[in-house]
Amino acid sequence: MSNYLDIEQQVAIAAVRRACTLTTAVFNNLVKGETLVKSDKSPVTVADFSAQAVINTILTSAFPTDPIVGEEDAADLRENSELRSRVVGLANDALGRELGLGEIAEWGLGRIRTEQELLDAIDRGRYEGGRKGRMWTLDPIDGTKGFLRGEQYAVCLALLVDARVELGVIGCPNLPQDVSNPSGPRGCIFVAVRGQGALQYTLSGGSPVPLKMPKLHLSELNLLESVESAHAALGVNERVAQILGITRAPTRMDSQAKYGALARGDGGVYLRLPTGVGYREKIWDHAPGALLIEEAGGIISDGHGEPLDFGLGRTLGENFGVVATGKGVHSQILKAVRQAQEEAKK
Ligand SMILES: Nc1ncnc2c1ncn2[C@@H]1O[C@H](COP(=O)(O)O)[C@@H](O)[C@H]1OP(=O)(O)O
Ligand SMILES: [Mg+2]
Ligand SMILES: [Mg+2]
Ligand SMILES: [Mg+2]
């Protein structure tokens, strides 16, 4: 008998691997005009579109009936022929390469797609989400601002069944494989399967390393937080650290690379508190990271201690931020969050 979600895991890792190769290549050749600004003022690049095209194409070929909640859609590309042909070229380069480790011909790799097929593949990510059945969440580039700065970003894919995350894959092309050797080799893939633990692979292949979060005392913790001050209330984080007596400086990093760092013990707490402008967190920004933390032995909730609800649609609804950390310190951190929040209201 095969292991739970064996095929899904192989497909997801292969898709994320191909997308990571693509995004790395695009970064090295990105030219002016290949970045657009979306209606929410966030950036999107040809790499985001083509990575979504690649992953959706592979998922659809392996699991034709599974819906996908993906961040991007093809509307901007349908009106811009220059951008469209660049995305189509990049996606076909990535899909057309010969089969790699663990890939099988039935996933339809190696075949060149038409423009129409690739735009439709991107738009397969428009599923509205919900509470029943299987669905994938995809963030083709999480942390686009980090990607554009040449810093951290992540290619993030998760499989949910009845709104519960069962499989999470996070590819981090720029993340050092070993935090104690920051100038050493980069490129990690984090994989979590419910009930089966969390693993780190290197992007280049090889055997995975199991991840287990270390038991840390409050005094040893440091916060993992956003680089962008518009994404999280960094001032409140500072106060939370002060209340807890944390003296180590926070680690600022874009994207769900933070969840990978937390799962392997490079930091003690992922802390993301709302800035108060009414932004709703998206399910693709937390689904794979949430399972990774649970399977590495940690706990994840919102800032009030409530579980994250992935069954509300494309967003986490009215949720109050995210707190992910070790089981031993979670309640103390929530208490400090409450105190900092009350002080901020005064
Ligand atoms: N105003 C906002 N508040 C919170 N998160 C945001 C906001 N705008 C974009 N994001 C998303 O936050 C995530 C990055 O947060 P972090 O600061 O932890 O790196 C990304 O998913 C980013 O989208 P994107 O996937 O488009 O980069
Ligand atoms: Mg975005
Ligand atoms: Mg994102
Ligand atoms: Mg994104």
Image: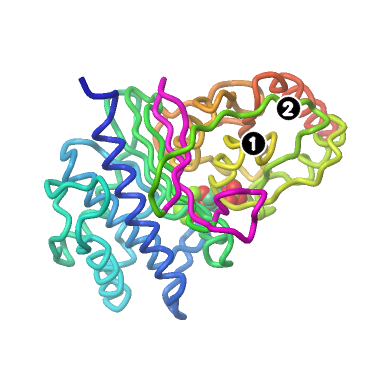
Looking at the image, can residue 337 be seen? yes
Q: Earlier in the sequence, mark 2 or mark 1?
A: 2
**Which quarter of the picture shows residue 109?**
bottom left
Which sits in the foreground, 273 or 332?
Answer: 332
Q: Which residue is mark 1?
A: 265
Q: At label 1, which amino acid type do we have? A: Gly
Element type where label 1 sits in the image = loop
Q: Determine whether label 2 and label 1 are within 8 Å by CB.
A: yes
Q: Which residue is mark 2?
A: 216
Image color mode? rainbow
Residue 182 among magenta residues: yes
User: How many tags in the picture?
Assistant: 2
**What residue range appears in magenta?**
175-203
Q: Is residue 99 above or below residue 215?
A: below
**Which quarter of the picture shows residue 288?**
top left
Q: Position of residue 159 (x, y in %)?
A: 34, 33
Which sits in the foreground, 51 or 281?
Answer: 51
| Residue positioned 67% across, 45% down in the render | 225
**Residue at the outermost front position:** 207
* 130 relative to 179 in the view: left or right: left
| Residue positioned 36% across, 63% down in the render | 22
* 50 relative to 110 in the view: left or right: right
Q: At label 2, which amino acid type do we have? A: Leu
Disc 2: CA contacts within 10 A as few (<14), some (14-19) or many (>=20): some
Query: What is the CA distance from the residue labelled 2 to the residue labelled 1?
Result: 9 Å
Q: Which mark is residue 322?
A: none
- Image quadrant holding the C terminus, namely top right
Q: Position of residue 321 (x, y in %)?
A: 62, 35
Q: Position of residue 96 (x, y in %)?
A: 20, 63
* 43 relative to 64 in the view: left or right: right
| Residue positioned 27% across, 31% down in the render | 6
- Image quadrant holding the N terminus, namely top left
